[in-house]
Image: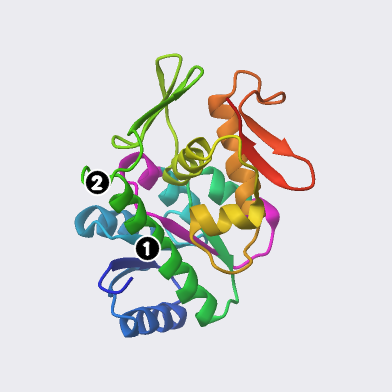
Amino acid sequence: MSGSKILVVEDDRNLLEVLKYNLAKEGHAVVTATDGVQALDVARSEKPDLIVLDIMLPKLDGFEVCRILRREMTMPILMLTARAEETDKVVGLELGADDYMTKPFSMREFLARVKAMLRRTEMLKTATSPNKETIPSLIKVGEIEIDLARHTVSRSGTLIDLSPKEFDLLAFLIKNREQVFSRDQLLEKVWGYDYAGDTRTVDVHVRWLRQKIEYDPANPKHLLTVRGIGYKFEG
């Protein structure tokens, strides 16, 4: 969505300018930072709608920046990594990033992901506004209770700390419980991607949700895998 404020954190000045130029062409207001400490300062002062965050940064790396931001803010974070190593991707997602891209990437795909992330955020705001709500804002399934309006989840009365995307995924599956969704469908419905994305993103979020909402994550009661298809929420 145009008109959004986006923070781009990248120490490669050439790439920073390219990303800034293309985002501005799409109608976004772009603020920038070139190291981790500056990224935190700008994020706190500007309160952007989305953050594009490189992993390899001076002073404070992107992982630590993501960890700190996730304790303070809920805007979507798109991490950039120069390496295709699976560990980088998984760690970023586990720290609360919504998605990641591996350099080099096409500008078309980058802009599509940004658009999808912003669109999904706006859809969630609309879905939880009082005059637009079409389902109960408070849903209870067994010992799990999710408050769509307050963006909180509890299990047996104890609040559970979820990242924004973990909450989005859980909310979608609970609202559509007993239905089975493929990984590609979840990327489309929860992440907003209308093209084939990296399904590892879904698997990592499901794994971490199980660690948080299931009493026995190895033998889940609610968040189930349907072999050969995908996932469903049962209860």
Element marked by disc 1 = helix
Which residue is drawn at the image coordinates 60% and 77% (left, top)? 104
Which residue is drawn at the image coordinates 59% and 72% (left, top)? 103
Task: Establish if 228 lies above or below 215.
Answer: below
- Residue 57 seen from this side: yes
Q: Nearer the viewer, residue 186 or 81?
A: 186
* Location of mark 2 (residue): 129
* Location of mark 1 (residue): 118
Q: Nearer the viewer, residue 164 or 233?
A: 233
Disc on the earlier residue, 1 or 2: 1
The question of residue 232 being in magenta is answered with: no
Quarter of the picture containing the C terminus is top right
The question of residue 77 being in magenta is answered with: yes
Left or right position of 134 against 94: left
The residue segment tinted magenta is 68-89
The percent position of residue 107, horizontal first and vertical second, equals: 51, 81
Left or right position of 38 against 107: left
- Amino acid found under the numbered disc labelled 2: Ser
The percent position of residue 172, horizontal first and vertical second, equals: 49, 43
Q: How many marks?
A: 2
Left or right position of 175 against 75: right
